[in-house]
Image (cartoon, helix red, strand yellow):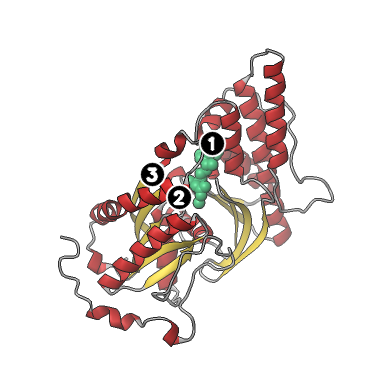
Amino acid sequence: MADEPLVLGIETSCDETGVGIVRGTTLLADAVASSVDEHARFGGVVPEVASRAHLEAMVPTIRRALKDAGVAASDLDGISVTAGPGLAGALLVGVSAAKAYAYALGKPLYGVNHLASHICVDQLEHGTLPEPTMALLVSGGHSSLLLSTDITSDVRPLGATIDDAAGEAFDKIARVLNLGFPGGPVIDRYAREGDPTAIAFPRGLTGPRDPAYDFSFSGLKTAVARWIEAKRAAGEEVPVRDVSASFQEAVVDVLTRKAVKACKDEGVDHLMIGGGVAANSRLRALAQERCERAGIRLRVPRPKLCTDNGAMVAALGAEMVARGRRPSSWGLSADSSLPVTDPHVPAPDDASAGHSHEHVHEVSKENLYS
Ligand code: KG4
Ligand code: ZN
């Protein structure tokens, strides 16, 4: 609908330069430039390489998004950007770009939370988020169970990983198996031809005295690495497909078990799963099976919206505009450890601490995009 907010969102928290444009809950453009290939030979994301790549990709990616959406920058109702959490230098590039565009165009600026954005993106696929929403966020940088009654103002952490993130575990095991980086997609592929019950790997933090909603993958990672080493030391061939399937099963078993338990305990009858690991085919299938059995509705966005992208940041920005949330000030800074409980970073109450957005309209907008 034409009266819904038109927002451009910028995401640079890790190795993807994402620029998305949405109108309300409708996706208009989702342009992503990834530097993942530049990190592959290091087996993980190198922050300085990522920052430089963002700098180079930023303006072309913004232009591409505007072109794909068929909108003019002057039509935007706001610009949102990931303020954190993420890599400090990488976030800084996005925040600086967002400020520059917002200031020059005379648009309100919204610094938003990367994790809340991963949840909010589901609106683009399945419509308005039910409230409250239970969310399982699993990626290379985070593994959390979150409960939100309003994605613009109330996100409550129920549990998180106490060591490695789920995606990190996939990446590390892939490295031990010499499968390259990122490890998730390739392990997912091998696992399809393997036996998930071939090797009984441990399920972290599932004992009766363990915290119900926290995760731990470091013990599993060590167990898998040791198992592989023992095979190699004995001069035996490592059954990559069975190891992949058994490792993957251990991860997704714990993730889905805890997420369904959280829904039941909190009386929430639907679950959303987001983050890069939500692209995992076995996680999707097992979550579907267990949710159905428990009478829970499962919402998982398509894989492209699960991995880092700008559309998710635009989706949350549009929600901020729609709900009349206060924009950020020009003093907005990147916060590598922005708490998950802050869906956005509003300007301080004290108006003198930030610049009024009214001033912005005096800035010339001529030739900005020529
Ligand atoms: O959300 P994302 O793009 O970036 C972060 O914020 O981390 O997630 C990337 C992570 C990587 O660890 C990658 O191995 C994992 O998501 N991943 C997968 C799959 N596709 C990506 N993990 C398991 N199965 C997949 N199919
Ligand atoms: Zn992410």
Q: Kindly tell me whether mark 2's CB lies below 8 Å from ligand 1.
A: yes
First-in-chain label (3 vs 1) = 3
Q: CA distance from mark 2 to mark 3?
A: 10 Å
Q: Horizontally, is 272 left or right of 227 in the view?
A: left
Q: Secondary structure at mark 1?
A: helix
First-in-chain label (2 vs 1) = 1
Q: CA distance from mark 2 to mark 1?
A: 14 Å
Report if residue 144 is visible in the image. yes
Question: Pointer 3: what residue?
Answer: 34
Q: CA distance from mark 3 to mark 1?
A: 16 Å
Q: Residue 96 appears in which quarter of the rendering?
A: bottom left
- Amino acid identity at mark 3: Ser
Question: Pointer 1: what residue?
Answer: 184
Question: Pointer 2: what residue?
Answer: 308
- For disc 1, the neighbor class at 10 Å (few under 14, some 14 to 19, many from 20) is many
Furthest residue in direction front, as rendered: 48
- For disc 3, the neighbor class at 10 Å (few under 14, some 14 to 19, many from 20) is some
Q: Quadrant of the N terminus?
A: bottom left
Report if residue 307 is visible in the image. no
Q: Is residue 331 above or below residue 222?
A: below
